[in-house]
Amino acid sequence: MTDAWGIVVAGGRGDRFGGPKQLELLGGEPLWEWARRSLIEGGVSTVVVVGAMDGAVDPGERRRDSVAAGLAEVPDGVEYVLVHDAARPLATPTLTERVLARLRQGDVAGVIPGNAVRDATKRVEGERVVAAVDRDDLVTVQTPQGFVAAVLRRAHATVEGDAADDAELVAGLDEPVVYVEGEITNLKVTVPADLRLVEAIHAS
């Protein structure tokens, strides 16, 4: 057993996609398998897949519930856990390596990939544009996200309410979370048009 395990969250209903997108094929393989392989090839020893597929752990109602179900399968002796969304099939093993390398420096509780916001950003009320937003200190966040396993367990056990991702839960403990450079091609498949774009990038 090495110091890092992974969790692939593959249990969503895919309401905006029109079905369970994690089962869609890319290059003949389901999206969740692409996510799993990127973790393994990036240095994670074992990956727990959470979803409604053979050999996987049953998912929960919310994303955080699914992560908790996967986390319950990770042995206590594991030091780091990386959480990855099945809907991001183009994340590379290099990104996993980058997250792990920063995490192993030992001075933070979590590491997340992010990209600087490149477009002008506005705040709106309904259809009305009400203000410009300074984007200099904004990043868009991706997965895989890496955490000290003990801190992630404590966050899931003590931080109440829902959260967009595990970094939000860990930050709720006032534990330090930092970001490393993400990948422009690490797109999240949310609607069918996203999958067509991912297929085009994969084919290029």
Image: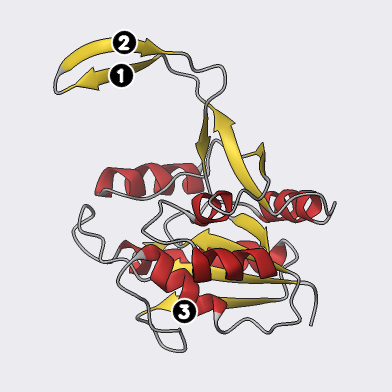
Query: Which amino acid, by three-letter code, is at mark 3?
Result: Ala
> On the image, which quarter does residue 104 sit in?
bottom right
Query: Which amino acid, by three-letter code, is at mark 1?
Result: Arg
Figure check: 159 above or below 45: above
Residue 102 at what x, y percent from top left?
78, 48
The CA span between labels 2 and 3 is 41 Å
Figure check: 97 above or below 50: above
Q: Which residue is mark 2?
A: 131
Q: Which residue is mark 1?
A: 123
Q: Residue at x 23, y 54 (%)?
A: 17
Q: Residue at x 36, y 58 (%)?
A: 162
**Dot 2 or dot 3, earlier in sequence:** 3
Q: Residue lying farthest left? A: 127
Q: Secondary structure at mark 3?
A: helix
Question: Viewer-proximal residue, 179 or 162?
Answer: 162
> On the image, which quarter does residue 72 sit in?
bottom right
Question: Viewer-proximal residue, 165 or 33?
Answer: 165
Residues tagged 2 and 1 counted as in contact (Cβ below 8 A): yes
Say left or right for 124 vs 107: left
Residue 101 at what x, y percent from top left?
80, 52
**Classed neighbour count for the residue bearing mark 3: other residues with Cα under 10 Å, few (<14), some (14–19), many (≥20):** many
Q: Secondary structure at mark 1?
A: strand
The CA span between labels 2 and 1 is 5 Å
Question: Viewer-proximal residue, 128 or 90?
Answer: 128
Q: Which residue is mark 3?
A: 69
Question: Viewer-proximal residue, 89 or 78?
Answer: 78
Quadrant (top left/top right/bottom left/bottom right) for the N terminus: bottom right
Color scheme of the displayed model: secondary structure
**Classed neighbour count for the residue bearing mark 2: other residues with Cα under 10 Å, few (<14), some (14–19), many (≥20):** few
Query: Which amino acid, by three-letter code, is at mark 2?
Result: Ala
